[in-house]
Image (spheres, rainbow, N blue to C red):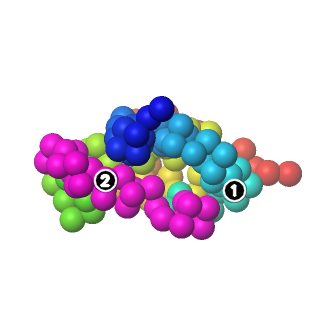
Amino acid sequence: MKTNKTILLTIVMVGISGLAGAGRVTIAPDRMLEVRRRQVNDSTLRSRAVQETVFGVALADLQAGLARMWVLPELLLKLMDDAYSDDPRVRNVTLAVDLARHSADGWADAALPDDYARIAELLRSTPEQVKAMVGAQEAAPEG
């Protein structure tokens, strides 16, 4: 039988290794599936808000707290701390993860325009050029 510390360490490692979200499903599959179901049904919902509703806490906050408790390497802590969002290494990883997560089911996610704009700012480009670089396709009209 696993100890609580082993279980919590597994949660942290899964969360860190699955920054794009895919690895987090193993934490609480039924609740993560509920988060996923809600977002599929309403693409305007943001992950943090749905996680707070379903779990009572945003998974990023849980992950960061546990990482600090176990004194994990500084770069990992920076990747999880919004205070370092302007750090170039953190910004590159964050933008890549956000784009990957938001485009996982196609190009209609409500968060993608924000991603394009933030990447364009980093690259000193335009959102339209970023869309072309990543191969984004216009969403087909519903109906």
Does residue 138 appear anywhere in the picture?
no
Q: CA distance from mark 2 to mark 1?
A: 26 Å
Q: Is residue 140 magenta?
A: no
Q: Residue at x 16, y 54 (%)?
A: 87
Q: Position of residue 140 (x, y in %)?
A: 72, 44
Circle 1 — which element?
helix
Kindly give the residue lying farthest to the front in the view shown: 1
* Of 131 and 108, the residue lying toward us: 108
How many neighbours does mark 2 have within 10 angstroms: few (below 14), some (14-19), or many (20 or more)? some
Q: Does residue 73 appear to the left or right of 117 in the view shown?
A: left
Quarter where residue 53 is shown: bottom right
The image shows residue 4 at horizontal and vertical percentages of 40, 45
Residue 73 as seen in the image, left or right of residue 96: left
Please name the residue shown 42% across and 53% down the image. 115
Mark in front: 2 vs 1: 2
Residue in the image at 66% along x and 46% along y: 30
The quadrant where residue 13 appears: top left
Q: Name the disc covering residue 66, or none.
A: 2
Q: Which residues are magenta?
A: 49-77
Kind of element beneath mark 2: helix
Q: Residue 1, relative to residue 121: is it above or below?
A: above
Q: Amino acid at mark 2?
A: Leu
Q: Foreground: 97 or 18?
A: 18
Q: Residue furthest right?
A: 143
Residue that carries the numbered disc 1 in the rendered image: 38
Mark 2 vs 1: CB contact within 8 A: no
In the image, residue 76 lies in the stretch drawn in magenta = yes
Q: Label 1 neighbourhood size at 10 Å, few (<14), some (14-19), many (20+)?
A: some
Q: Position of residue 28 (x, y in %)?
A: 57, 45
Where 139 sits versus 59, above or below? Answer: above
